[in-house]
Image (cartoon, grey):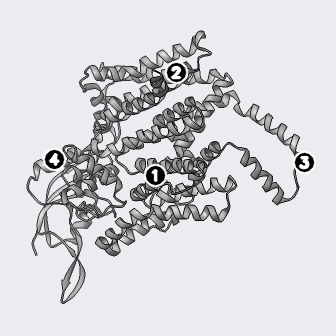
Amino acid sequence: MKSFDKNLPLIVVLVVAILMLLPFLGLTEFNTKGEPREAVVALSMLKEGNWILPVNNGVDIPYKPPFFHYCIAVLSLLSDGVDEYTSRLPSALSLIALAVGVFAFYRRRLSTTTAVVGAMLLLTSFEVHRAGMNCRVDMVLTAFTVGAMLLLYRWWERGSRGVPVAAVLCMSCATLTKGPVGFVVPCLVMGVFSLLRGERFWRTFLSYALLGILSCVLPAIWYVAAWHEGGRHFLDLVYEENIGRMSGTMSYDSHVHPFTYNFLTLIIGWMPWALLLLMSLLAKPWKETGKKADDDIRKDSSGWPKGVKERLARLRVRVMLVPPVKLFTWLGFLLVLLFYCLPSSKRSVYLLPCYPFMAIIIAEYIGWIWRTRRLGVSRAFVGVMAFVAVALTASLLAVRLGLVPDTVFHGKHAAQNLAMLHGLRDTPLDVLRVVVIALPLLVSVDCLHLSLARKNRNNEKVFIYSLLAPVVALFIALEGFYQPIVLNTKSLKPMAAYIAQTFKGEPLYQYINSPMFHFFGADFYLNDSLKQFDTQRRVAVGGKTVTRVVTPKYGVLVIPESDFADFAKRHRDYQFTHVKTLDRHYSEVRNDVGFYRFRKVK
């Protein structure tokens, strides 16, 4: 019984993580280009048997190292093949492992309450939860990167003796997931931490440089094998995706944003908890802290040395007085944020390694709200969550009763909005769906009642439950009912189904004028059978190897209608027969898609 009580917080974190993620992974079909682009790599691995540098979409080699795709392929071998569920499963399992790892790490070093709240905040932040439900490399990279940091910290606690094998393996897997950032970021954070804790510069530099080199041993095996297979094209891709992206010298603009972009994405990524932080400003949390800081400055200013070197020495002493785990947590947040502010290419998912450390910082802030009895903030937040739950349920009820007419939608997106409306209105409801829909409303009302009751004002467990449970329930409802219905109206599957039914057995080809763009969704759902119209191949001519563009003799062409006129002018030796045009919402290229049978006539 004592063992169960001791492990109950861990069980709660694990069960909540599983319930929030695993049941709903396969409900939403692919509706953006990013997910099928990754999934089709694993599909081509299994289809071709090439686990080093598989070719997909008829011409592409993977833009990222293969560890994430290995995970999809292995999990798919245990199932009926690569599908939406198995392709997202590595991300979900990574998030579950990350939440449990963060809980276990901080439970030993801070408190059980802080660890539980931090893990739950991590699971319910918008950006992290979205990454855990997507077929993208970022969640797997984050789990290994943060895992390496936590293991390196534990190694530092034990005197930095020997080789931290587990940390090196984590950095190796992170590097095999997305490149050198997998070892650079953990070594940077722990290197700066060690220096601030008084370690010698050269000893610290050489130690983490050696660990970085060790973590490159396994990735180097793949890089050499891939270079042997892909040649110069592979090396150019590696340079552009790593050096070019960090230095801003890529051959094309990729997610170029100003310095302020990362801070905006952090606010959005921490929804709905960013709302709690903004609401807490009304309680003036800085007032008490600022007064204490002013008192310390007045007390110590007379004794401060005047020289710059002396001031830096005094600052270092103050840093040394900060508890090591708190210094490590703040550095894990700030250094990762600063690191990804440097390149011109910025995406919200790049900042994912910040989130576990921010979750602990916010958890400690929530603990401060409880200790200082600023309970009006928490009650207001629970009230907002209850209002959202009521509004969401009432809106669905109005739609189901037919109180929202089709005429409410106008403009170019009217058809898609109507499809969403009809999906919400006409989808059959079974017992499980009714429970999922009602969950946010029931939980939010219960939490609001608990938080307002006088008898619970000194009950910390009720305070924590009332804050966390409504958000967990809302995420379960969104993933279990609302999001799949809404997003499946933009599914890429119907276009693939049309192609498979109309052109069964015919050779399939695609062309998009924009570089690096393909019909990733259709190609995935067509089992990677949608090849490129024109491909470059190396052929032997007169004893020399030259590169030539090879085109097919006949087949079916899938092309954006806006690209067809120029394409036909450049291929006058072909006869094209228009078959059909599909609306833009069937494809990720945001353009009407044309289907043409073609035959070479010259």
Residue picked out by circle 3: 303
User: Residue at horizontal 29%, vertical 49%?
Assistant: 72
Residue picked out by circle 2: 466
The CA span between labels 4 and 3 is 79 Å
The number of callouts visible is 4
Q: Secondary structure at mark 3?
A: helix
Q: Is residue 6 visible?
A: yes
Q: Mark 4 touching mark 2, by CB under 8 A?
A: no
Q: Secondary structure at mark 1?
A: helix
- Viewer-proximal residue, 78 or 267? 78
Left or right: 110 in relation to 565? right
Residue picked out by circle 4: 498
> Mark 1 or mark 4, which has the lower sequence index?
1
Left or right: 404 in relation to 327? left
Residue picked out by circle 1: 166
42 w.r.t. 134: above or below: below
